[in-house]
Image (cartoon, helix red, strand yellow):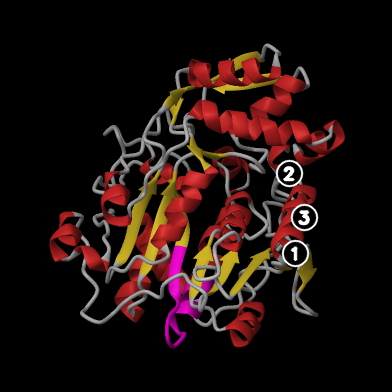
């Protein structure tokens, strides 16, 4: 289960659009935020990545810079010590569980999560994930704000982490329309805070972080490639995630910090977030509620099963290039929303009720070109949408109805919080 981190500043949710002043950012270089944010908003993406063992030709194909001779990223093995931010989140818990299932030679010596347990969606679900990690693997998820460098510093003093996987963030496309300042705090301030801390450690740990397919915005080139320019933002969430990539590039330029950003494509599976389509639609159909379909339902999503995403994360934790690298992690098989709904209806034995609504924030199609991740990491997604939904539904039906409905709630369902 989760535990509080002694008397530190813990358990506080991020500031929102309610007129309250945000907490002071505790970071070694808070002043770097403004410059990094400007770079994030106005730069265009150029690069890609590779693995040192592949050689310069493979790296140069993707505009990556080979690590210097003799420079390597630490292997994930019995000597590793891993910090996972967002450890009570969907992907964070799944990653920690996967690391906990490794054999004696490759299982890290230390795996610790950190999470704020805020109420964007039901905290009870996050505590359920943390309890699973504690019960099955003996792993703790510390309840604390990633922006609190006092907590991060104490954890590093105790464990001397070799790997940091930063998955904590404010997620959600539609929520970014109504609660923009939450994204400024979590997806800019806290990113700079953690990056600045990690960049000044000696030696620097391997740094992997969550980006998103939303960075591609209104890009008309399909499938989405890491070589495409990022110059048509569709929403603040996607912009903030592209900002993370540019901030990582700035820290490589200034401090030599090697990093890997992972553009996740519509992740789903057991323990999935209730604001994502699979969980959201399943609960609404089960309860006879009406589902809102945007853009006339003419939408395709590259649904990617969580186990495939975790495979990509673990491979990227050993990836070495002398730049700020990015990878697409998707299934590379877009599914039309109508077919997706039919598959859920079939497994529930209930027909969906739905209505249409226009939205400029929703991207019509996501489609990952994963050839770079396949070539340079060995990434190979294997889970079809049908198999993935079977596994999700088997987990979902094991929950009692009260738990299913409780975990379906959260602040993401609320309307805009007005400034006062």
Q: Which residue is mark 3?
A: 127
**Above or below for 134 versus 252:** above
Foreground pick, 253 / 23: 253
**Above or below for 224 versus 190:** above
Q: Residue at image x 60%, y 52%?
A: 94
What's drawn in magenta, residue-wise?
A: 193-208
Location of residue 86 by image quarter: bottom right
| Upstream in sequence: badge 1 or badge 3 | 1
Give left or right: position of 373 versus 161. Answer: left
The x and y percentages for residue 34 are: 45, 68
The x and y percentages for residue 349 are: 70, 14
Q: Which residue is mark 2?
A: 411
Q: Which residue is mark 1?
A: 12
Quarter of the image with the N terminus is bottom right
Q: In this view of the protein, can residue 202 be seen by the observer?
A: yes
| Upstream in sequence: badge 2 or badge 3 | 3
């Amino acid at each position: 289960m989760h535990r509080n981190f002694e008397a530190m500043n813990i358990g506080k949710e991020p500031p929102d659009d309610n007129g309250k002043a945000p907490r002071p950012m505790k970071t070694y270089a808070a002043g770097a935020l403004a410059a990094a944010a400007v770079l994030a908003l106005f730069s265009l993406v150029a690069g890609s990545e590779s693995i040192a063992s592949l050689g310069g030709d493979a790296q140069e194909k993707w505009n990556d810079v080979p690590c210097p001779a003799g420079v390597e990223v630490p292997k994930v093995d019995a000597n590793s010590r891993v910090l996972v931010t967002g450890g009570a989140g969907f992907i964070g818990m799944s990653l920690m569980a996967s690391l906990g299932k490794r054999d004696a030679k490759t299982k890290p010596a230390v795996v610790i999560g950190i999470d704020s347990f805020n109420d964007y969606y039901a905290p009870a679900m996050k505590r359920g994930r943390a309890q699973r990690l504690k019960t099955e693997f003996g792993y703790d998820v510390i309840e604390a704000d990633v922006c609190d460098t006092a907590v991060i510093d104490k954890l590093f003093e105790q464990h001397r982490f070799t790997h940091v996987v930063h998955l904590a963030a404010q997620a959600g496309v539609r929520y970014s329309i109504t609660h923009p300042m939450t994204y400024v705090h979590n997806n800019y301030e806290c990113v700079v805070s953690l990056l600045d801390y990690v960049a000044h450690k000696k030696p620097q740990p391997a740094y992997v972080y969550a980006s998103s397919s939303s960075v591609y915005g209104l890009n008309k080139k399909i499938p989405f490639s890491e070589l495409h320019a990022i110059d048509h933002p569709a929403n603040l969430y996607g912009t903030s995630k592209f900002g993370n990539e540019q901030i990582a590039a700035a820290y490589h330029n200034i401090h030599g910090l090697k990093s890997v950003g992972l553009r996740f494509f519509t992740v789903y599976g057991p323990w999935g977030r209730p604001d994502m389509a699979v969980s959201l639609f399943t609960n609404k159909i089960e309860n006879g509620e009406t589902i809102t379909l945007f853009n006339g339902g003419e939408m395709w999503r590259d649904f990617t099963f969580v186990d495939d995403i975790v495979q990509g994360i673990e491979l990227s934790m050993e990836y070495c290039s002398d730049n700020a690298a990015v990878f697409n992690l998707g299934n590379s098989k877009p599914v039309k929303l109508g077919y997706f709904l039919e598959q859920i209806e079939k497994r529930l034995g209930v027909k969906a009720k739905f209505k249409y609504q226009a939205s400029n924030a929703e991207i019509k199609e996501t489609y990952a070109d994963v050839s770079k991740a396949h070539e340079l990491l060995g990434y190979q997604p294997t889970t079809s949408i049908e198999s993935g939904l079977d596994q999700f539904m088997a987990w979902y039906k094991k929950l009692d109805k009260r738990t299913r409905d409780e975990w379906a709630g959260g602040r993401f369902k609320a309307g805009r919080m007005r400034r006062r």
